[in-house]
Image: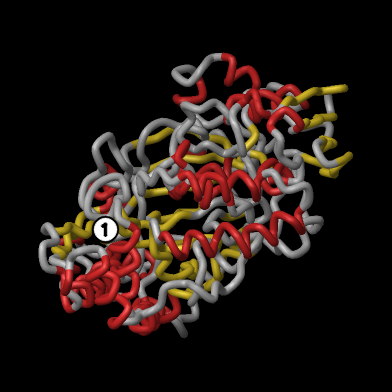
Amino acid sequence: MISRRSFLATSGAAAALTHINPDFFINSAYAQTRKPIVFLSAENITGNWDPTAHTTLSQKNIEGYVMGFLARAPMRPDNPDEMNYELAEAIELLDGSRLQIKLRSGVTFHDGEPFGAKDVKATFEYGAQPDRPAQWYPGPTDSFEVTTPDDLTVIVDTSKGGYSASLFIFLAAYLPMMSAKDIAGGPNGPLSQRLNGTGPFRFVEQRGNDTILEAFDDYFKGAPKVAGVTFSFVGDATTRILSMMNGQASIIERLEPEQIDTLSGRDNIKISKLVSVENKYLWFRCSKPPFDNPLLRRAACHAIDREILYEILGDAGHPSSNFISPIKFGYIDLENYPEYDPDECQRLLAEAGFPGGQGLPELEYITSVGFYPKTKEYGEIITAMLQEQGFPVTLSVMEVAAWNERLYDRPGGGPGHMIDCGWSTGSPEPDLVLRTHFHSSSKRITGIVDPEIDAALDRERSAGSLEERRRLIQEDLTPMLADKAPALSLFTSVMVHAIDSSLEGLFLFPDGSIDASTADFV
């Protein structure tokens, strides 16, 4: 079970929230008649505020309130033209290597600077720098060129990079647009110190575990109806649910299955369930023995019965047999995806020179508690399954902050031998998962270096059309990943939120972010 403090120790939910000061919102025009949304996050804030400098979902979700995007859309990858334009009025391919973006006029950043083509150009070029951890783009800065024929037109030309501009349809539309003025200050300037967007809520300050956002009354779609958003990290799942039950939280996330049962049927609470863009993975440290050997990685995959995991997860998990979510572009149920097969596991162990697991070193499997549902419970099951097949595995369960510190690969190999982590992006673009994690230029968690995978990733990226990209992803790249198994995608996450039933007008996106621009308490 997830580690929880007792009800008495927390003195109810109030102990977690008494420090939230409504005076934070007195500068908002209608503070006396509006109240803030209180969102309790299961993940902590790490690093600085530069949107290109971090990969934590909590910060991405905060950006969803503050930053502006060219488009925000229900993710239907089979119909990429279906976009809910925000800062853009139109995004279209001019030809195979050129993408044109037409921008909305009359939009300003929270600091008063007008938004225009210069900001889109600066955002694209800055985000493509190789030292940017988020690495949003399909290649380095010199692989594409951005021109601005006028203040409201942006042309992206990918001919220098040798790949189709169609790739930018998914990438460009869903990225937080930054101010060119902020970008000019460099990664240690204003970008790192605060968020400055065009969205409905303005960043005020970070106070401990609370991120304070205030309604931006000059928002181009109209002033929000709520006073702002207090986005608070509360790592204890029991405290979050008590806060929801006591009416001190407006929204909580990542509900456990039993918490869904507890809250369902209450008149003052509604439950939202949404199949997400996030897959949950067991990542192998491919950068060091023994999982630098694909035979052992595949053997481990065949030791795991994912059907049992679905039973543990209940509503929080959705079956999938690929390395990307079913709502990402190019998804298909892979015929060769590794399924539970103890005989095949033993055959591969023997082929790798470790019959029955004999001779394998002690292995560490790292997981977290307090953020993802049921990680400890299903981690214990996976550990037992691996041990049954001869893998000498020990499970290390950590609080979120400690787990975050151990997540990424390092020279000589990252901590542990396997680590549990999900990966969510605000776009249906599959390369934001596949290239990010499996190309040797961006070996985020696994540390894998494999020329054949690199070549397959380059082939699909360079396809001349979306249809050709889809074919290469489905018939070439992802089947190869299933054979080499740098990770095992366990399931697709279902984003489960509990929401104050009086709060209406929210739109929840499949990456966990929320559009609260028209939300109100009724």
**x 69%, y 43%: residue:** 462
Q: Nearer the viewer, residue 14 or 73?
A: 73
Tell me where residue 369 sits by quadrant: bottom left
Height in image: 411 above or below 308?
above
Q: Which quadrant holds residue 236?
A: bottom left
* Left or right, residue 393 beside residue 439: left
**Number of numbered discs:** 1
Q: Which residue is drawn at 45% across and 79% down?
A: 315
Q: Can residue 320 be seen in this view?
A: yes
Image coords of residue 94 (percent x, y):
88, 39
The answer to whether residue 392 is left or right of residue 57 is left
Q: Can residue 496 be seen in this view?
A: no
Q: Residue at x 52, y 45 (%)?
A: 454
Q: What residue type is labelled 1?
A: Ser
Q: Nearer the viewer, residue 495 or 321?
A: 321
Q: Look at the picture and state if 493 lies above or below 519.
A: below
Quadrant housing the C terminus: bottom right
- Above or below, 397 against 94 in this view is below
The image quadrant where one finds the N terminus is bottom left
User: Percent from the top left, x then y, of residue 227?
Assistant: 56, 46
Q: In percent of the image, x 69 and y 41: which residue is there?
A: 172
Give SS at disc 1. strand
Residue for badge 1: 368
